[in-house]
């Protein structure tokens, strides 16, 4: 008898999508189990026995897992493909990666720095799900006007969109009359969150670069280049 797992985990194990994306696929009626449409998120399947398909394409367990760090440049979207035909981060990978790889979370079009890519949906789940509170550190160059009260507000959490952010770690690294260089660490990862946080305290982000996720650091990896994560880095991100 094969291992019994939840359907969304199986989809992630096959490298089709992250668990959260898999839940969306199930909710949209795009997943079948042994030819029958899956109607429950919590349904369990047996690896090697049940046949799972997404949009009619039967899934297979991935034979090799890839864990990649990319130093993303500005001007690339963090998706596998783009409806506006903009360059994607996948374009920066070499041809030796011959399997479907997808970004772990996102960096917006104007942001550069550390981006992880994988074909392991469980890895994506561990790194991105809010319950694991994985820290993400950025260097932000912001315009003039950042005050002590603004810094303290970021450290307490600020209201953006329809929620209040968790307290951030904030350190001023450099400043002149026109701009301030700020090191900021957050424990969430919502859309354009760092930019919106600074806007909430009255300053505009001029440049943004992610330099670490947890203890995994970008280091001196050149802009636009990539490398495989070490076994130690993968184990840390999976078990932190």
Image (cartoon, rainbow, N blue to C red):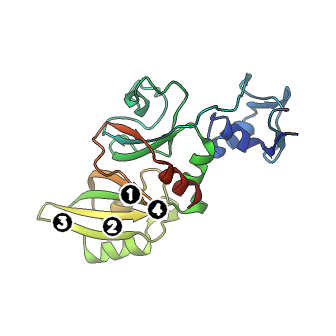
Residue 159 appears at what percent x and percent y? 45, 66
Labels 4, 1: front one: 4
Q: Regarding mark 1 in the picture, which secondary structure is present there?
A: helix
Task: Write the residue at 64% across / 46% down.
Answer: 20
Labels 2, 1: front one: 1
User: Is residue 240 depicted above or below 57 in this figure?
Assistant: below
| Residue highlighted by disc 2 | 201
User: So how many labels did they put on this image?
Assistant: 4
Q: Give residue 46's quadrant in the image.
A: top right
Q: Are marks 4 and 1 in contact (CB under 8 Å)?
A: no
Q: Regarding mark 3 in the picture, which secondary structure is present there?
A: strand
Task: Write the residue at 58% across / 47% down.
Answer: 123
Badge 1, how many Cα within 10 Å: few under 14, some, many 20+?
many
Q: Please give the label number shown on residue 135.
A: 4
Q: CA distance from mark 4 to mark 1?
A: 13 Å
| Residue highlighted by disc 3 | 174
Task: Tell me which numbered mark, 2 or 1, is placed earlier along the sequence.
Answer: 1
Labels 3, 1: front one: 3
Q: Is residue 75 left or right of residue 107?
A: left
| Residue highlighted by disc 1 | 194
Task: Write the residue at 48% across / 27% down.
Answer: 97
Q: Quadrant where the N terminus lies?
A: top right
Residue 190 appears at what percent x and percent y? 49, 54
Residue furthest to the left in view is 177
Q: Quadrant where the C terminus lies?
A: bottom right
Q: CA distance from mark 2 to mark 4?
A: 21 Å
Q: CA distance from mark 4 to mark 3?
A: 22 Å
Task: Tell me which numbered mark, 3 or 1, is placed earlier along the sequence.
Answer: 3
Residue 199 appears at what percent x and percent y? 34, 60
Q: CA distance from mark 3 to mark 1?
A: 18 Å
């Amino acid at each position: 008898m094969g291992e019994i797992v939840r359907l969304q985990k199986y989809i992630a194990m096959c490298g089709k999508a992250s668990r959260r994306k898999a839940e969306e696929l199930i909710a949209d009626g795009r997943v079948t189990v042994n030819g029958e449409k899956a109607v429950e998120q919590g349904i369990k399947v047996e690896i090697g026995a049940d046949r799972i398909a997404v949009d009619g394409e039967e899934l297979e367990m991935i034979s090799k897992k890839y864990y990649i760090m990319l130093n993303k440049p500005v001007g690339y979207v963090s998706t596998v493909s783009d409806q506006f035909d903009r360059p994607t981060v996948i374009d920066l990978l070499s041809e030796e990666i011959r399997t479907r790889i997808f970004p772990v979370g996102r960096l917006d079009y104007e942001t550069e720095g550390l981006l992880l890519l994988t074909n392991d949906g469980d890895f994506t789940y561990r790194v991105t799900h809010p319950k694991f509170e994985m820290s993400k550190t950025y260097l932000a160059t912001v315009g003039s006007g950042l005050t002590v009260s603004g810094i303290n507000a970021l450290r307490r959490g600020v209201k953006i969109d329809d929620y209040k952010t968790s307290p951030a770690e904030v350190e001023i690294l450099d400043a002149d009359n026109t701009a301030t260089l700020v090191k900021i660490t957050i424990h969430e990862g919502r859309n354009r969150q760092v930019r919106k946080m600074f806007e909430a305290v009255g300053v505009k982000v001029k440049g943004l670069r992610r330099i670490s996720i947890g203890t995994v650091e970008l280091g001196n990896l050149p802009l636009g280049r990539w490398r495989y994560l070490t076994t130690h880095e993968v184990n840390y991100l999976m078990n932190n």
